[in-house]
Amino acid sequence: MRSRKQCHWESFKKERNLVSKMVKESHSQYLNNVIGDSLTNNLKKFWSYARTSKSEIIGIPPLRAGSKFCSTDSDKAEILSSHFASTFTMECLPPPATDQSPYKSIAKLQITTQ
């Protein structure tokens, strides 16, 4: 059921913040129980927690160069290097011609101070 009353919104925010605080405290207490005791008594629990809580590094998936797929790190580095070199290398273009302007010349301006 939805209500647009300010008092309900304030009550919701208060309860939400209380639950968030309780979850954080519970997690902290869990970590103290698992890690705190296991550092001196049982390292297996600590490493089990560390292994499950780490984030995985996926890396760069296989890349295609033409019709060939490359999966080794050195091949991927070469493909990416050549791509970025071709994308960000400035071409040697001649400067634009400045001898003729499509606009009329204006008379010389004279600026004075009073």
Image (cartoon, rainbow, N blue to C red):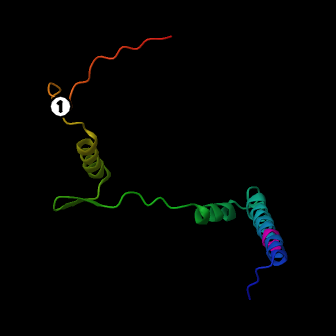
Residue type, numbered disc 1: Pro
Tell me the residue that label 1 is attached to.
96
Would residue 18 be counted in the magenta stretch? yes
Which residue is depicted at the point 29% across and 54% down?
A: 72
**Seen from this angle, which residue lies furthest bottom?**
1
Q: Left of 105 or right of it: where is 17? A: right
Percent of width and height locating residue 88: 28, 41
Which residue is depicted at the point 28% across and 45% down?
A: 84
Which residue is depicted at the point 79% across and 68% down?
A: 17
What is the tally of numbered marks visible in this picture?
A: 1
Percent of width and height locating residue 61: 34, 61
Q: Left of 69 or right of it: where is 40? A: right
Query: Can you say which quadrant of the picture contains the N terminus?
Result: bottom right
**Seen from this angle, which residue lies furthest front?**
114
Looking at the image, is 36 positioned above or below residue 4? above
Which residue is depicted at the point 85% across and 76% down?
A: 7
Name the foreground residue: 83 vs 108. 108
Magenta segment: 15-19
Percent of width and height locating residue 8: 82, 78
Q: Check disc 1: other Cα within 10 Å, few if <14, some if 14-19, many if 20+.
A: few
Name the foreground residue: 99 vs 88. 99
